[in-house]
Image (cartoon, rainbow, N blue to C red):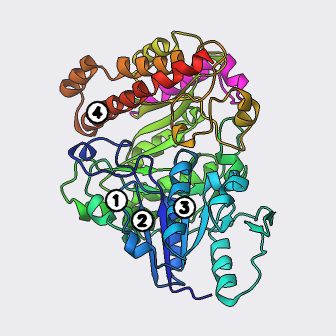
């Protein structure tokens, strides 16, 4: 098969729409593109010169450029799967290109995804994508581990593939169409992913099902080069950008403690003139040496996966921890001069009406800088999804984006959606906006204003969904 031109597509939900609001609001009409897909684009570019990526999160797709590609890869997360299937059908209707799907959702639900494409690449594709292209080019059987396809209508899966031990590719941001122009937006931050996998096993989390329990890490040089290039790329797009913040997007950066210490010391020694943030489990709050290193390296806050406020909820979903431990962790992180951002889940079976108010009071009491509020989420292939199948309202994946999609144990779906709206409104109130305007300084000031606008847009979306949820209540 001739392979001279390859295109990668990241579906958007919703797709990017130009407007003044996306200069300030993240996660409504503009979002950071997938680091994983950009990494694969970079890997393939070394084999096929005419390789380019489009992300609907930051630009429209130039279809005249896409339709004459030989192979088109589409990567999907659950919330963008519906849009991904629409794009695959649109391509099939207008071109002769081979369509290949991958990503977390396609891997977890390949019997579903294969109906929209020619092949599904399973799991991490750093190595398998090159094997796939080699097989196509030379007409070899596509039967290596890590792929699914239909043969005479029969579904064939070659099984899981051993994940790569080394993945030091530094993604080339130049390969993403229109990214250089859009990277000037203060809503788009430099991002670096430095490790994969998680040793824990929370029932609602898809990370361990996709990347495994064993944590694998990149080399120090690779991580530093990635940080340097990501910063340079974004600052070149906007030399006067106000939001000088880089996000280490690892799901559990601190799982390999020795490696994390080495990385933080290297970042500190490099003296980047940037602020850093990273996701963390609460346990890092008990590691004083790590917290001191984070401060020294330029980290200003930690996005802590608090998730729940009640001990019974932790037990229900196989997440270690207690409320008391969470509080001690928050207070110790703050004592080291670091802010805490809280990641919360509403809709656990232990939750009752009033959870939104209780959560907002917790945020205020413990001086949490900002929040991510989501309904209990259900990714196919996770224990939470498997045990809740009969209580899911639908399989409209486009709604699996933090909205309510299930019947909670102690509330109706609409009541839970209202709890999320009320929590957001209390935390991001006009009063708190005024306080942030006068009392917060520097990057904290700008972050809260941006989040205030974002949360308003999220609440509008959640309110639009209430009639459908009320109808579900009656069924």
The 10 Å Cα crowd at callout 1, few under 14, some 14 to 19, many 20 or more, is many
Q: Position of residue 40 (x, y in %)?
A: 54, 69
Q: CA distance from mark 2 to mark 1?
A: 7 Å
3D distance between C-alphas at marks 3 and 2: 17 Å
Element marked by disc 1: loop
Contact between labelled residues 1 and 2, with CB atoms less than 8 Å apart: yes
Q: Is residue 102 left or right of residue 5?
A: right
Give the structural element (helix, strand or loop) at label 2: strand
Label 2 and label 4: CA atoms lie apart by 27 Å
- Point out which mark residue 89 bears: 3
Q: Residue furthest front?
A: 93
**Which dot marks residue 59?**
1
Q: Nearer the viewer, residue 394 or 174?
A: 394
Q: Quadrant of residue 294?
A: top left
- The percent coordinates of residue 23 (x first, y second) are 24, 47
Is 346 situated above or below 59? above
Percent of width and height locating residue 265: 48, 55
**Residue tagged by mark 2?**
54
- The secondary structure that dominates the magenta segment is helix
């Amino acid at each position: 098969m001739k392979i001279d031109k390859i295109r990668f597509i990241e579906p958007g939900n919703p797709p990017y729409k130009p407007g003044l609001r996306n200069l300030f609001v993240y996660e409504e009409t503009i979002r950071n593109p997938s680091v994983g897909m950009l990494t694969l684009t970079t890997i393939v570019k070394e084999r096929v010169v005419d390789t380019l990526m489009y992300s609907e999160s930051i630009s429209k797709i130039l279809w005249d450029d896409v339709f004459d590609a030989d192979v088109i890869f589409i990567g999907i997360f659950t919330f963008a799967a519906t849009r991904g299937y629409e794009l695959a059908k649109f391509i099939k209707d207008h071109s002769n290109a081979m369509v290949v799907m991958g990503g977390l959702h396609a891997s977890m639900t390949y019997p579903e995804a294969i109906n929209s494409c020619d092949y599904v690449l399973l799991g991490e594709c750093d190595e398998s994508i090159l094997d796939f292209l080699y097989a196509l080019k030379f007409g070899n059987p596509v039967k290596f581990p890590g792929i699914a396809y239909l043969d005479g209508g029969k579904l064939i899966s070659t099984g899981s593939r051993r994940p790569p031990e080394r993945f030091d590719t530094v993604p080339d941001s130049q390969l993403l169409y229109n990214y250089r122009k859009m990277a000037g937006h203060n809503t788009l931050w430099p991002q670096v992913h430095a490790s994969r996998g998680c040793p824990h096993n929370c029932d609602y989390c898809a990370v361990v099902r996709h990347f495994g329990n064993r944590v694998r890490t990149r080399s120090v040089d690779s991580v530093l080069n990635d940080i340097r290039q990501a910063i340079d790329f974004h600052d070149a797009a906007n030399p006067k950008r106000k939001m000088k913040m880089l996000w280490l997007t690892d799901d559990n950066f601190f799982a390999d403690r020795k490696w994390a210490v080495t990385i933080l010391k290297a970042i500190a020694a490099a003296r980047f003139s940037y602020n850093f943030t990273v996701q963390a489990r609460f346990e890092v709050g008990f590691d004083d040496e790590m917290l001191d290193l984070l401060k020294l390296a330029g980290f200003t806050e930690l996005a802590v996966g608090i998730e729940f406020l009640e001990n019974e909820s932790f037990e229900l979903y196989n997440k270690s921890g207690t409320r008391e431990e969470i509080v001690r962790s928050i207070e110790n992180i703050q004592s080291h001069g670091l802010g805490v951002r809280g990641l919360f889940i509403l809709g656990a079976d232990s939750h009752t009406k009033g959870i939104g108010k209780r959560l907002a009071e917790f945020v205020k009491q413990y001086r949490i800088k900002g929040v991510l509020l989501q309904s209990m989420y259900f990714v196919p292939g996770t224990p939470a999804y498997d045990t809740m199948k009969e209580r899911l309202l639908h399989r409209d994946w486009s709604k699996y984006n933090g909205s309510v999609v299930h019947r909670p144990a102690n509330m109706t779906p609409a009541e839970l959606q209202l709890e999320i709206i009320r929590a957001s409104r209390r935390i991001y109130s006009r009063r708190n906006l005024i306080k942030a305007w006068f009392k917060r300084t520097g990057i904290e000031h700008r972050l809260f204003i941006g989040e205030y606008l974002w949360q308003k847009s999220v609440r509008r979306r959640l309110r639009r969904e209430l009639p459908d949820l009320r109808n579900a209540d009656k069924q």
